[in-house]
């Protein structure tokens, strides 16, 4: 049959040559027609199609002589065509990184530099009876040995509660606790000196789990007891909601300690400039300005005398938001008056640094026969280790994330975060969400199975929409793309053709069963109600044409610096090559908040647009005097100001900048933004106002003999408002999928009586290129009007639902469910045996 | 500490140094010679961040004693650029968006070069195996595999464009 086609906008490139018709097999669908034109999955996830002037879905069957109009993506009207935003612009830091020129903090060295080592605890819980450092001090080459006595200020750090000791005085509470610091002429001498430090301990009972910690007779780890934090939220009447349900599903889940496994171990260099009285610390970081304050608190110093340079950082994922080496470097540099380098080994990193909290969760969800959720009841217990750091907000976000992006009339969420002598539970990409989404997305899969409803369909029936009251009780005020991400996943090749794909794989690999599973998530963007959530930027227009953007945000690999340059180039309508970005330096850049909570494009982007608007306004006023023209008759366009009526009257911003410099009033300004907040305040930073939405699909193979699970293909369909950099969003999704795969299958920081059993990459296994699946990213855009160019954020969500999607795929393949992560071959084999019985 | 005099070719230049007998190559490169493009992620042969080419073969420089490269040719990431022009593998990493934090990148590029030197037309599975000794936590490897595939194409085009070899 013959179908008439007309393509619009960017889709014009798919138009058939010299023809406005295509041939299609009889009974073909709109989707088939689009594919025969060459539209790819991403195009399909956006495209709008009219058949004979009526908007249709893609499964609509066409008839001979039909006429299709195919439109490019439209979000709230025709989308502006951007020059940089939404393009796969190469990263501005790529050339230096690929040539090895980039200097990370651990690459720095200075003449006369000393090497530092940290003496750490030998027991997970013990009193320190005696500490003798004399032998270490006497070792030739040793320049300083410091203990708790040498800390001038508060002996503790922590983003929320500073009770993580800089150096322990009386008691150690986990294997990573620091007792003394050594600085020596070289690494080996510093290590030997550490061995010469004599510590006499009195061992104390070790609290190895939250259950143990909550027993009445448990040793109390802190004065306030063993419960660090509790949180409870409710909406409606959960009992009534469960009564109204036709089907109820319940389950209990648990998750393991996970390490960030960034490839650059924490480290850096400290220098004390005696003449100026300035301490400079280079370190891997996510927030130099908070590091500066935490150093100042421990040193009892004026923070303005402390310079922290945290950019660039070789991966962080939440694991470098808290203090690592900063305070130790400050103490040693100040005491020795020499440059000092401290760089954790991999083993130290695995033992000392904070981890993703293990959580035990309980879910109860009710639904009606037609698949409408009536209620959700969630209970969460987190193992937070012995020191607080940022454990409390992580529990809170776990509760907020636990219902998923769905509508429930009644809900109840309760959680507690508990002290133990295990590793420290801390910030990690996902911030409490991976632990709960692991459970809820399996429960929803179970409900769909019980009700005989397709797993994507049941989620669509309950999907939150803009303006809805959420399961927590706040209004969904910003863009909500739950349905859109579900539809994008539904339209992906992997989901549409899953039965055929599974059949073929099962045939090709006897002894293996294959399956496809999916899961969804909403992920909060920003810090939440009541927590200062701001960004500042500085903008300078130089007479030589250079444009300098200064932001305190740190480049940890996520690509924010490039995204900022794209947005600024777009706002000022100039070539991106002109932009230089200074970042992450407390003396050279303004405070832009932490790079955390998927926030830095949203809040910094708005600050950049604010700064660019001010520059443009000022440029018009200055141009008015230069061009001798009424400012109301001037307009800013493409990096210049011109008269609306006289084409001769035009002046570029660099020329305006030159005049401004001569008048000693340089063309520069500040930009600022405070993140908009929710209409409700549940306390403790809840709830949030912006969310990333994402649906992920996994194809797995389960080896029936060995129990090994392989992930063969994955699809991510994130909705982040607007993608500023296509490569950046895809990169976050690809990296997120593989990290979530590691969480699902391999990674497990094993603890036994407070000891870490997996303190290297031979025992703590992260995925390699061979393990990683083929990944397709389908970018879904539902632009948010209060976001820069419609953007929200995307850093964390792509690592979250993939983990339960893998389990749902294993269930699809082999009919088994495993509730405690990770899905090891042993557990699979045992579950398969149980299933047979 | 006993020291050893060694002479080797480093990125094309004759290099003579005296090193402690127990110093590994990565520490010679980074601490003594200032070549910090070669990274340390584990210092025990697990992550591949310190990969360099020794006589054309990719090795973890944390597992090689500096004394062992006496008389050999060592190429680090700093040696791939030719008079300011990037190696096609480096170009491909930039164009394909294969870099995030960048800390694994030098080792990845070295492993990719070793692979493409032996196998100019690798399958995707061969690429994945070729870089499986290099851990990356940011990218999920997808764009790195794309970059190595694109680099193979670039090298083929350059080789086939009039020059015969």
Image: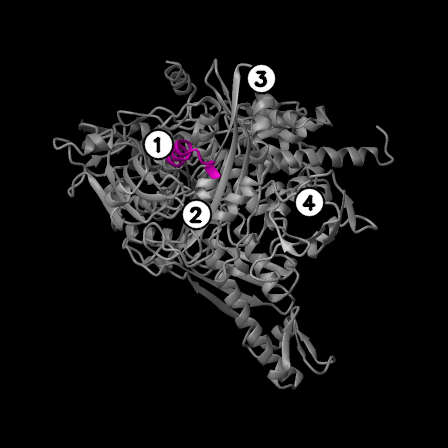
Marks 4 and 1, how far apart at CA: 49 Å
Q: Is residue A148 left or right of residue A539?
A: left
Could you say which disc has been placed on residue A463 in the image?
2
Counting from the top left corner in percent of width and height, residue A186 is at: 43, 34
Marks 4 and 3, how far apart at CA: 38 Å
What chain letter is assigned to the residue under label 1? A
For mark 3, does the 10 Å Cα neighbourhood hold few (<14), some (14 to 19), or many (20 or more) residues?
Answer: few
**Label 2 vs 4, first from the N-terminus:** 4
The relative height of residue A302 versus residue B97 in the rendered view (above or below) is below
For the residues carrying marks 4 and 3, which lies nearer the camera in this image? 4
Q: Residue at x 35, y 28 (%)?
A: A820
Magenta-drawn stretch, dominant element (helix, strand or loop)? helix
Marks 2 and 1, how far apart at CA: 26 Å
Provide the residue designation for mark 3. A509
**Do marks 2 and 4 share a chain?**
yes
Disc 3 on helix, strand or loop?
A: loop
Magenta residues span A442-456
Provide the residue designation for mark 4. A62
What chain letter is assigned to the residue under label 4? A
The relative height of residue A837 versus residue A145 in the rendered view (above or below) is above
For the residues carrying marks 2 and 1, which lies nearer the camera in this image? 2
Marks 2 and 4, how far apart at CA: 30 Å
Marks 2 and 3, how far apart at CA: 37 Å
Marks 1 and 3, how far apart at CA: 31 Å
Counting from the top left corner in percent of width and height, residue A550 is at: 51, 60
Residue toward you, A248 or B81: A248
């Amino acid at each position: 049959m013959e179908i008439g086609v007309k393509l619009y906008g960017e889709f014009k490139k798919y138009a058939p040559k010299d023809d406005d018709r295509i041939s299609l097999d009889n009974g073909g669908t709109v989707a088939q027609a689009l594919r025969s034109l060459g539209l790819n999955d991403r195009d399909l996830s956006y495209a709008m199609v009219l058949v004979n002037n009526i908007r249709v879905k893609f499964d609509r069957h066409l008839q001979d002589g039909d006429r299709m109009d195919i439109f490019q993506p439209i979000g709230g009207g025709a989308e502006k065509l951007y020059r940089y935003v939404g393009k796969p612009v190469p990263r501005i830091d790529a050339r230096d990184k690929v040539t090895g020129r980039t200097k990370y903090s651990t690459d720095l060295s200075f003449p006369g530099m000393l090497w530092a080592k940290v003496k750490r605890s030998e027991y997970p819980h013990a009193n320190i009876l005696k500490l003798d450092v004399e032998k270490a001090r006497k070792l030739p080459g040793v320049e300083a040995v410091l203990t708790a006595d040498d800390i001038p200020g508060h002996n503790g750090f922590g983003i929320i509660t500073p009770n993580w000791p800089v150096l322990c005085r009386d008691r150690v509470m986990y294997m990573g606790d620091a007792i003394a610091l050594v600085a020596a002429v070289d690494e080996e001498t510093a290590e030997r000196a550490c061995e010469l430090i004599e510590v006499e301990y009195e061992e104390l009972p070790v609290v190895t789990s939250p259950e143990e910690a909550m027993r009445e007779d448990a040793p109390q780890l802190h004065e306030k007891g063993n419960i660090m934090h509790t949180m409870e939220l409710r909406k409606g009447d959960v009992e009534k909601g469960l009564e109204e349900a036709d089907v109820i599903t319940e389950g209990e889940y648990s998750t393991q300690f996970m390490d960030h496994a960034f490839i650059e171990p924490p480290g850096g260099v400290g220098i004390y400039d005696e003449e100026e009285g300035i301490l400079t610390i280079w370190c891997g970081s996510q927030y130099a300005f908070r590091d500066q304050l935490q150093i100042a608190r421990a040193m009892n110093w004026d923070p303005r005398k402390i310079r922290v340079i945290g950019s660039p950082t070789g991966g962080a994922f939440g694991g470098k938001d808290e203090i690592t080496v900063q305070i130790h470097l400050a103490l040693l540099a100040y005491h020795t008056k020499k440059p000092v380098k401290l760089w954790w080994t991999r083993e130290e990193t695995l033992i000392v640094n904070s981890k993703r909290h293990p959580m035990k969760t309980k879910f109860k969800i009710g639904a009606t026969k037609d698949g409408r959720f009536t209620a959700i009841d969630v209970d969460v217990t987190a193992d937070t280790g012995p020191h607080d750091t940022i454990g409390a907000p992580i529990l809170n976000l776990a509760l907020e994330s636990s219902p998923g992006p769905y509508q429930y009339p009644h809900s109840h969420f309760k959680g507690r975060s508990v002290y133990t002598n295990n590793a420290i539970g801390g910030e990690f990409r996902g911030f409490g969400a991976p632990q709960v989404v692991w459970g809820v997305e399996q429960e929803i899969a179970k409900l769909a199975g019980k009700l005989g409803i397709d797993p994507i369909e049941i989620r669509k029936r309950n999907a939150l929409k803009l303006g809805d009251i959420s399961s927590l009780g706040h209004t969904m005020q910003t863009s909500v793309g739950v349905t859109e991400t579900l539809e994008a996943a539904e339209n992906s090749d992997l989901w549409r053709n899953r039965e055929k794909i599974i059949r073929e794989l099962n045939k090709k690999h006897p002894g293996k069963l294959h399956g496809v599973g999916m899961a969804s998530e909403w992920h909060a963007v920003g810090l939440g109600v009541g927590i200062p959530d701001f960004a500042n930027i500085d903008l300078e227009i130089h007479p030589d044409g250079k444009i300098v953007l200064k932001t305190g945000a740190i480049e940890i690999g996520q690509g924010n610096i490039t995204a900022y340059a794209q947005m600024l180039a777009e706002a000022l309508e100039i070539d991106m090559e002109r932009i230089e970005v200074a970042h992450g330096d407390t003396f050279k850049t303004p405070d832009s908040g932490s790079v955390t909570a998927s926030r830095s494009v949203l809040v910094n982007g708005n600050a950049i647009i604010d700064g660019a608007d001010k520059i443009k306004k000022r440029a018009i006023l200055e141009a008015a005097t230069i061009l001798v023209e009424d400012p109301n008759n001037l307009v800013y366009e493409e990096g210049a100001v011109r008269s609306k009526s006289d084409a001769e009257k035009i002046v570029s911003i660099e020329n305006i900048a030159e005049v401004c410099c001569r008048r000693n009033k340089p063309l520069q300004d500040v930009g600022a933004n405070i993140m908009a907040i929710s209409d409700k305040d549940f306390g403790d930073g809840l709830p949030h106002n912006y969310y990333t939405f994402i649906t992920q699909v996994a194809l797995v193979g389960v080896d029936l003999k060995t129990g090994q699970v392989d992930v063969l293909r994955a699809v991510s369909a994130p909705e982040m408002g607007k993608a500023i950099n296509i490569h950046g969003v895809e990169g976050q999704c690809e990296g997120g999928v593989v990290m979530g795969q590691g969480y699902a299958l391999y990674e497990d920081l094993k603890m036994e009586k407070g000891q870490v059993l997996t303190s290297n990459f031979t025992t703590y296994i992260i995925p390699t290129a061979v393990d990683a699946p083929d990944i397709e990213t389908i970018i879904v855009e539902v632009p948010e009007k209060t976001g820069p160019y419609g953007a929200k954020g995307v850093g964390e969500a792509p690592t979250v639902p993939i983990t339960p999607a893998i389990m749902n795929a294993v269930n699809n393949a082999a009919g088994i469910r495993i509730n405690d992560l990770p899905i090891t071959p042993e557990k699979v084999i045992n579950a398969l045996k149980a299933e047979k019985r | 500490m006993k020291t050893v005099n060694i002479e080797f070719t480093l990125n094309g230049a004759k290099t003579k140094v005296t090193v402690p007998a127990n110093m590994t190559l990565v520490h010679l490169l980074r601490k003594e010679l200032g070549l910090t493009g070669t990274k340390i992620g584990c210092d025990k042969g697990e992550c591949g961040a310190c990969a360099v080419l020794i006589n054309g073969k990719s090795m973890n420089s944390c597992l090689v004693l500096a004394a062992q490269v006496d008389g050999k040719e060592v190429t680090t990431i700093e040696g791939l650029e030719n008079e300011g022009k990037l190696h096609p593998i480096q170009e491909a990493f930039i164009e394909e968006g294969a870099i995030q934090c960048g800390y694994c990148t030098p080792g990845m590029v070295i492993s990719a070069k070793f692979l493409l030197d032996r196998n100019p037309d690798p399958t995707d599975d061969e690429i994945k195996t070729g870089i499986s000794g290099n851990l990356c936590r940011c990218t999920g490897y997808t764009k790195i595999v794309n970059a190595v595939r694109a680099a193979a194409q670039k090298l083929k085009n350059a080789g086939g464009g009039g020059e015969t070899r």
